Amino acid sequence: MRKSEQAYPVEIVERIFYIRGQKIMLDFDLAQMYGVETRALKQAVRRNKDHFPKDFMFILNLAEMKNMVSQNVIPSLKTLGGARPMAFTEQGVSMLSSVLKSKRAVKVNISIMRAFVQMRQLLSSNKDLSKKIEELEKKYDGQFGMVFDAIKSLIHQKQQPRERIGFLKDKL
């Protein structure tokens, strides 16, 4: 995979969504990352249905699709061409590399798995931090209320991806 084609963990995390209480990735995002057409990815999944039980992959219903359009995840329902997107859980994404059977699929899967792990670690560390702040709040009286509120708002803010800095070898 060339450097320009490689997905960085931040780019991958931006393509992970919560639907039905699960972290998922959509078929068209995965197809783009794997360098295949969405149609080909769906076809490979259909040919190997036994690899994808319901806890590995499910198809979005119309309400979920409309919700994704309203959140600007999907530009419009017309762009899907009438096809409903497949949503892959972490295990389903892992299974895709065995179905697609390419070196690129394996490399992309490794990146995706690392992104899922990073996400879990970030969520875990935020929970620990929130718990410690609550303990401090109980320990101190109301005079520090504003400080604790400000800290909580900072913790729960969605972080914007940082722009990469430094020199790129290809551009010198």
Image (tube, rainbow, N blue to C red):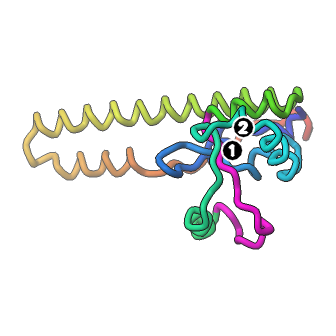
Q: Residue at 86% across / 35% down in the picture?
A: 3
Residue 79 in the magenta stretch? The answer is: yes
Residue at the (90%, 34%) spot, across then down: 2
Q: Which of 109 and 65 is in front in this view?
A: 65
| Residue 81 appears left or right of 17 | right
Asked whether the residues under the numbered discs 1 and 2 touch, taking CB atoms below 8 Å apart as contact, a structural biologist would say yes
**Residue 98's disc number:** none
Q: Can residue 105 be seen in this view?
A: yes
Q: Which mark is residue 11?
A: 1
Mark 2 crowd level (few <14, some 14–19, many ≥20, 10 Å Cα): few
**Image position of 129 (left or right of 72):** left
Instruction: State the image quarter where residue 36 is shown.
Output: top right
Residue at 55%, 43% (x, y): give it.
23
- The structure residue drawn at horizontal position 90% and vertical position 40%, both measured from the top left corner, is 171
The vertical placement of 70 against 25, above or below, is: below
The image quadrant that residue 95 belongs to is top right
**Toward which corner of the image does residue 24 lie, by quadrant?**
top right
- Is 86 on the left or on the right of 149, as rendered? right
The range drawn in magenta is 73-90
Q: Badge 1: few (under 14), some or many (20 or more) residues near its Cα, within 10 Å? A: few
Q: Is residue 15 visible?
A: no
Residue 140: % across, % down: 10, 38
Quarter of the figure with the N terminus: top right
Q: Please state which of residues 102 and 159 is positioned toward the viewer in this rendering.
A: 102
Q: Name the residue under label 2.
A: 8
